[in-house]
Image: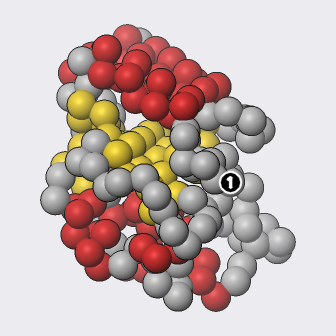
Amino acid sequence: MNIRERIFAYRFRKQPARQAIFPDFENVRSVLVLYESDLLEKNMVVKALRDELIRMDKDAVIWGYCDKKEITTPILPQARILGKKDINLLGAPKEDVINDLTKRHYDLLIDLTQHPILPLKYVAMYARTNFRAGLRMEPADPKGKEQPELHDLLISTAPQESPRYLFDQIIKYLKMIHTK
């Protein structure tokens, strides 16, 4: 585990305890979706997933991260891509980004990241949300030490080329668990 990840783990442990509220998916109104942006910032699959959530009568907001300095996509209320200019030396989003994030409360956070991306881990940590769902990641520490777990619902699957499969699994389990 590198120093940035250790600092994240420390900050995560210092967060106030939260009580996860398992959502009734039919009653979820606002969803924050986190994703890994492609270099061209097109993100057609993620935009299609956002449109699908909107058709389900959910207010969907998407936040991505692209590992480049200049982000060309405009910052919109419903979509934002973070870049290297938006994070500090420790990999955490800058204060203005965190302020934008925490202005809103979400019923559900869906984390579609397939690899550990520190800025999006911070976004997931700071997001004001009732419930978080995402992929179970392998520990970054070669010694196998457990990492702090951000999510309330973890999907165990190998990383996929597209976030579609993970999205479908999260929605399936959210619907299935509540109906039982």
For the C terminus, the image quarter is top left
Asked if 74 appears above or below 91 in the picture, the reply is: above
- The residue where tag 1 is placed is 115
Q: Bin the neighbour count of mark 1 within 10 Å (Cα to Cα): few under 14, some 14-19, many 20 and up.
A: some
Instruction: Report whether residue 110 is seen.
Output: yes
Q: Nearer the viewer, residue 170 or 35?
A: 35
- For the point 33% across and 64% down, the residue is 126
- For the point 54% across and 31% down, the residue is 44
Q: Nearer the viewer, residue 60 or 1?
A: 60
Task: Kindly state the secondary structure of the residue where label 1 is placed.
Answer: loop
**Residue that extends furthest to the front in the rendered view of this protein:** 72
Residue 43 image position (x, y, % from top left): 55, 39
- For the point 70% across and 83% down, the residue is 2
Its colouring scheme is secondary structure
Residue 177 image position (x, y, % from top left): 44, 20
**Residue that extends furthest to the top in the rendered view of this protein:** 179
**Residue that extends furthest to the right in the rendered view of this protein:** 142
Instruction: Report whether residue 16 is seen.
Output: no
- For the point 74% across and 41% down, the residue is 159
Residue 155: image quadrant is: top right
Residue 88 image position (x, y, % from top left): 46, 84
Residue 56 image position (x, y, % from top left): 31, 15
The amino acid type of the residue labelled 1 equals: His
Q: Is residue 8 left or right of residue 4?
A: left
Q: Is residue 161 left or right of residue 142?
A: left
Q: Nearer the viewer, residue 47 or 112?
A: 47
Asked if 1 appears above or below 61 in the picture, the reply is: below
For the N terminus, the image quarter is bottom right
**Numbered circles on residues, count:** 1
Q: Is residue 89 left or right of residue 142?
A: left
Asked if 138 appears above or below 34 in the picture, the reply is: below
